Amino acid sequence: MSILDAFNQYFEMIPADSYDLKQEVYKLRYQVYCLERGFLDPEEDGVEFDDYDHNSSHYLIRHRETNCYMATTRLVLPDKQNPQKLFPIEENSYIENKALLDTMPRTNLAELSRFCVSKTFRRRKNEQDLIVTNDTDESRSLDERKSSAHLTLALFACAVRMSAEHNIDYWYAIMEPTAKRISSALGIRFIEVGPLVDYHGMRVPCVIKVDDLLTSAAEKNSDYLQMLTNKGLF
């Protein structure tokens, strides 16, 4: 059975394209970023969102059996009326590699962010953006535990889907070094474009071309490509 087929038995990738689903996104981010990790100050209303959410595409990953949302990510899209409007990464880090950025049309550039998984599906409390599952939970089948280990890959698959839907060819991302190494292990090799910055912990500004991501992931494991593209549909 392929990674995608195993994953789909237990999880579902859902575009958060309605008010109610976006509220699920914001509630999950509140749980992860405000309560579990303490990166952001908790608000009384129990949701976490910012001004960029109004111009973003969002996805959720739902656990089929429990009907719980386990993971989410977003793409901050370019401003169609003002393509020079800064992305969050440009406001919170220093971009040194201007020459590389000049090869990426801003109308086809988006920022991958709010990449998070519920603590329920993280192995260790201090892991950030990792492939996650409670491997000792004997109440879940071995196949289910294996499939949940591909949540990180699935979040990247969500980003690929959003990119196809919005004509995005390049991603910005401001990443913890650990998350960058884990992505690289999946064949997803971000390019650093600036120095480390203290932004909710030490992070580095990066870019990646979506086509390069798919090519390198396929070279790593053809199953990864099937997962990222939903067997070529994206």
Image (cartoon, rainbow, N blue to C red):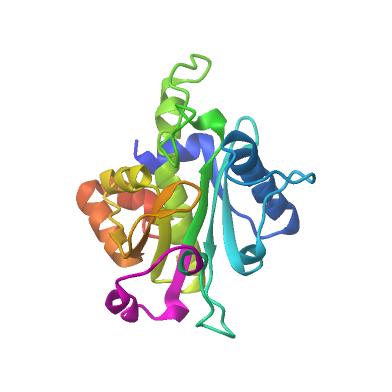
Location of residue 109 in the rendering, given as x and y in whole percent from the top left corner: 43, 73
Q: Is residue 98 magenta?
A: yes
Marker count (numbered): 0
Location of residue 38 in the rendering, given as x and y in whole percent from the top left corner: 59, 39
In the foreground, 201 or 105: 201
Tell me what residue is drawn at x 47 percent, y 23 percent.
Answer: 134
Q: Is residue 7 magenta?
A: no
Looking at the image, residue 25 sits to the left or right of residue 218; the answer is right
Q: Residue furthest right?
A: 44
In the foreground, 139 or 181: 181
Location of residue 106 in the rendering, given as x and y in whole percent from the top left corner: 44, 79
Q: Residue furthest left?
A: 219
Corner quadrant of residue 15:
bottom right
Q: Is residue 42 above or below residue 126?
A: below
Location of residue 47 in the rendering, given as x and y in whole percent from the top left corner: 72, 48
Looking at the image, residue 61 sits to the left or right of residue 67; the answer is left
Q: Residue furthest top?
A: 138
In the foreground, 186 or 82: 82
Q: Residue furthest front?
A: 198
Tell me what residue is drawn at x 45 percent, y 27 percent.
Answer: 123
Report whether residue 230 is seen: no
Looking at the image, residue 99 sits to the left or right of residue 118; the answer is left
Q: Is residue 47 above or below residue 57?
A: above
Tell me what residue is drawn at x 61 percent, y 30 percent.
Answer: 65
Q: Quadrant of the image for the N terminus?
A: top left
Instruction: Write down the region rendered in magenta.
Output: 91-111
Q: Quadrant of the image for the C terminus?
A: bottom left
In the foreground, 217 or 200: 200
Report whether residue 206 is seen: yes
Q: Is residue 20 above or below residue 5?
A: below
